[in-house]
């Protein structure tokens, strides 16, 4: 039986008391609401995200009956007399779902309604007409996407209307579904208010359900192999021959050959002979009905990997304020207001010049539409951004080095909740990744030194490097959003405030592909960088005297000269001593004499810079109370001086055991205490 899972916007609240006259049983038999909004209403009183919906009112869908579980005023009005489904059963009298209106809001964004259908049925949902026709169909497809192919739920031409809400119209979409459980989920904004079901034709044979993945456009190089995955399920008619389910992969379109490892399995691999865009089709049939799903693949050639723009800031007297040395993506200084000052040219860290940004101005880039590639069509399948930066002040969230608005690509100060505030990040929009857009950076750059930062996306992962060291990475796939916002150096054209940079920027480069680590290191090698040092995470220890604790320190050097590292005790509790096995090794061990907080520092030095990071270790002595709380008591520890276990097995425990010696409570033995 097909597993049906649906995600939607407002999600459905059922109360189901009607029975079908033909079958003598309910069509919708149960509903389980989870993760909805928490609020209160006159009908329910206080409710939470797991409160069950109220039953539908007697008579099903008809004028005057309440639609929602949390609204007293919203009732059906002007209900049409039309029919639904293969058996042309009337909408009036249909079983329906009473929704929680508040589940469409922020408090219900993760709401789920698991709805069970007992028989072959015409299932319908009503979608708010505030969506236009195309958007409304897209919303219907979205909320049914995990159990039905796009277009399965079709417009019926019928509408229901909500009295108490300006007689608001909602268009009805319907599909033939078999018995099973369907999970409806959230969708922000205008909502579909009801779900309904009418007994269907038991001889109806639904088409198979095909879900081919990746379910977004994916890009690979032509020498690579793509792994496909798919799910195919089918539900036969309640009455009649269910047929035999089979499936087949094929190339629907594309400029070259697509070679599958096996066209008759759900998870083959596939390779391609030429670059271009391909559609791979998985078709399933039960002998009566067919269905398919498509995977779109863009096959790339490394010969097309290019730099799109390069702003070295070495030309200070060109026809434009900032000159692109590669193409014609030149830029001009723009002031935030009449009291602002423009960026200023200063001696460069890479080459002869750099720009100093005061935090009140930026560079507006004009796109060269004639270059190949250009910013009107790239970066799309991959991207890299490289820059040299020196922070004067991090005094605003998400201060940008260079960006294409806030919905395509950018390098900026990392400012998520929990971030240190001293690190940076490379984020891209449109791709599938968690957390959205990319990871938060960890390595600090707010230290008065020049740093090389580079972000890359290659269709498989987002990576961010600081001074040639991989800072963070996370899996990602899909295409970057092609933004219509302007490219700014030193700010963000989409946001308000504009997240302007305060500090120096040099040698900015943008590519249409993901640079390799070797390419990033080559860019880092163009200038001097400080060492990277990390003393490791803070710790809280229950410490046994004499024990050695491993320190998770790290130091790396892509800068000039040899790297030296040194551990030291920055602070300790009174009388406390920390002893390092090897104070010159970042990954050494340490032992402590005395309990309390220790702050240890790891210093890394090359011939350009000296940087220090610290770790705090709270050293405490575990007690018997800790042993008891953590369930670590010995089996024979039954008592102590106060009648409770004391982490010792001694005479107190023997006395306790002797008290119960020879006692028994076997119900079948007359000599034992009866336990019941």
Image: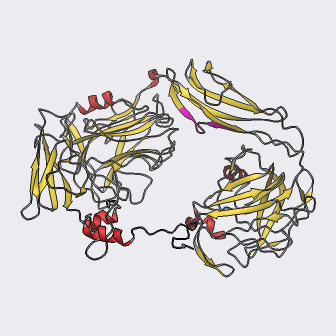
Look at the image and say whether residue 213 sits in the magenta stretch. Answer: yes
Q: Residue 19 at x, y = what percent?
A: 87, 65
Name the residue rendered at 74%, 62% in the picture: 30
Look at the image and say whether residue 292 sits in the magenta stretch. Answer: no
In this rendering, would 227 be left or right of 588? right
In this rendering, would 457 be left or right of 29? left
Kindly give the residue lying farthest to the left in the view shown.
575
Name the main secondary structure of what is drawn in magenta.
Answer: strand
The answer to whether residue 455 is above or below residue 89 is above
In this rendering, would 345 be left or right of 230? left
The answer to whether residue 351 is above or below residue 182 is above
Closer-to-camera residue (237/133)? 237
**Quadrant in the picture for residue 472:** top left
Which quadrant would the N terminus be assigned to in this image?
Answer: top right
Name the residue rendered at 10%, 40% in the picture: 584
Name the residue rendered at 68%, 30% in the picture: 281
The answer to whether residue 296 is above or below residue 261 is below
Q: Residue 143 at x, y = what percent?
A: 67, 53
Residue range of the region highlighted in magenta in the rendering: 209-218
Q: Residue 347 at x, y = what percent?
A: 17, 40
Closer-to-camera residue (36/23)? 23
Is residue 489 visible to the viewer in this orientation of the structure?
Answer: no
Which quadrant would the C terminus be assigned to in this image?
Answer: bottom right
Is residue 24 visible to the viewer in this orientation of the structure?
Answer: yes
Q: Residue 553 at x, y = what percent?
A: 21, 44
Closer-to-camera residue (110/81)? 110
Q: How many marks?
A: 0
Closer-to-camera residue (442/481)? 442
**Quadrant in the picture for residue 199:** bottom right
């Amino acid at each position: 039986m097909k597993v049906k899972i649906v995600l939607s916007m407002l999600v459905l609240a059922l109360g189901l008391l009607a029975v079908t006259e033909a079958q003598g049983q309910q069509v919708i038999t149960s509903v389980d609401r989870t993760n909805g909004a928490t609020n209160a209403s006159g009908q329910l009183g206080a409710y939470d995200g797991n409160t069950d919906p109220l039953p539908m009112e007697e008579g099903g869908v008809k004028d005057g009956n309440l639609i929602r579980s949390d609204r007293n005023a919203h009732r059906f009005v002007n209900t049409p007399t039309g029919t639904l489904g293969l058996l042309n059963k009337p909408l009036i009298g249909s079983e329906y779902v009473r929704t929680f209106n508040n589940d469409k809001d922020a408090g219900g964004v993760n709401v789920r309604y698991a709805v069970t259908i007992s028989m072959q049925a015409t299932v319908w949902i009503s979608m708010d007409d505030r969506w236009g026709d195309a958007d409304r169909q897209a919303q219907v497809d979205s909320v049914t996407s995990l159990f039905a192919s796009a277009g399965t739920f079709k417009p019926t031409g019928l509408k229901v209307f909500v009295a108490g809400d300006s007689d608001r119209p909602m268009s009805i979409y319907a599909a033939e579904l078999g018995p099973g459980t369907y999970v409806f989920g959230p969708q922000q904004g205008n909502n579909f208010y009801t779900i309904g079901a009418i007994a269907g034709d038991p001889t109806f044979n639904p088409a198979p359900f095909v879900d081919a993945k990746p379910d977004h456009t994916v890009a690979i190089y032509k020498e690579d192999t793509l792994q496909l995955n798919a799910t195919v399920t089918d539900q036969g008619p309640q009455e009649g021959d269910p047929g035999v389910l089979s499936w087949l992969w094929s190339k629907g379109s594309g400029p070259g050959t697509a070679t599958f490892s096996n066209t008759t399995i759900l998870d083959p691999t596939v390779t391609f002979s030429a670059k271009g865009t391909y559609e791979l089709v998985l078709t399933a049939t039960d002998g009566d009905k067919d269905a398919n799903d498509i995977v779109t693949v863009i096959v790339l050639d490394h010969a097309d990997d290019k730099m799109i723009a390069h702003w070295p800031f070495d030309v200070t007297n060109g026809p434009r304020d900032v000159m692109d040395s590669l193409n014609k993506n030149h830029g001009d200084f723009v002031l935030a207001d009449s009291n602002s000052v423009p960026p200023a040219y200063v001696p460069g860290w890479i080459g002869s010049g750099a720009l100093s940004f005061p935090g009140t101005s930026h560079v507006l880039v004009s796109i060269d539409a004639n270059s190949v590639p250009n910013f009107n069509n790239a970066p799309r399948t991959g991207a890299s951004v490289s820059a040299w930066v020196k922070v004067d002040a991090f005094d605003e969230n998400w201060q940008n080095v260079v960006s294409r608005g806030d919905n395509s690509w950018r390098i900026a100060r990392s400012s998520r909740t929990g971030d240190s505030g001293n690190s940076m990040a490379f984020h891209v929009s449109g791709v599938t990744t968690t957390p959205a857009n990319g990871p938060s950076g960890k390595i600090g750059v707010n230290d008065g030194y020049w740093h090389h930062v580079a972000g890359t996306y290659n269709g498989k992962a987002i990576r961010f490097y600081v001074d040639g060291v991989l800072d963070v990475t996370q899996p990602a796939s899909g295409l970057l959003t092609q933004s219509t916002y302007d490219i700014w150096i030193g700010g963000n054209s989409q946001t308000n405030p504009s997240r302007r940079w305060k500090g120096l920027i040099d040698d900015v480069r943008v590519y249409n592909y993901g640079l390799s680590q070797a390419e990033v290191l080559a860019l880092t090698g163009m200038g001097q960088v400080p060492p990277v040092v990390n003393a490791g995470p803070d710790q809280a220890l229950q410490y046994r005297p004499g024990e050695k604790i491993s320190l998770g320190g790290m130091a790396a050097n892509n800068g000039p000269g040899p790297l030296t590292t040194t551990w030291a005790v920055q602070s300790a509790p009174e009388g406390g001593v920390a002893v390092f096995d090897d104070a010159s090794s970042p990954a050494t061990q340490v032992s402590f004499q005395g309990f309390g907080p220790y702050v240890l520092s790891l210093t890394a030095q090359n011939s350009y810079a000296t940087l220090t990071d610290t770790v705090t270790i709270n050293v405490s002595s575990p007690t018997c109370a800790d042993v008891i709380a953590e369930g670590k008591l010995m089996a024979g520890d039954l008592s102590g001086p106060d009648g409770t276990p004391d982490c010792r097995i001694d005479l107190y425990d023997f006395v306790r055991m002797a008290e119960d010696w020879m006692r028994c409570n076997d119900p079948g033995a007359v000599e034992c205490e009866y336990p019941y």
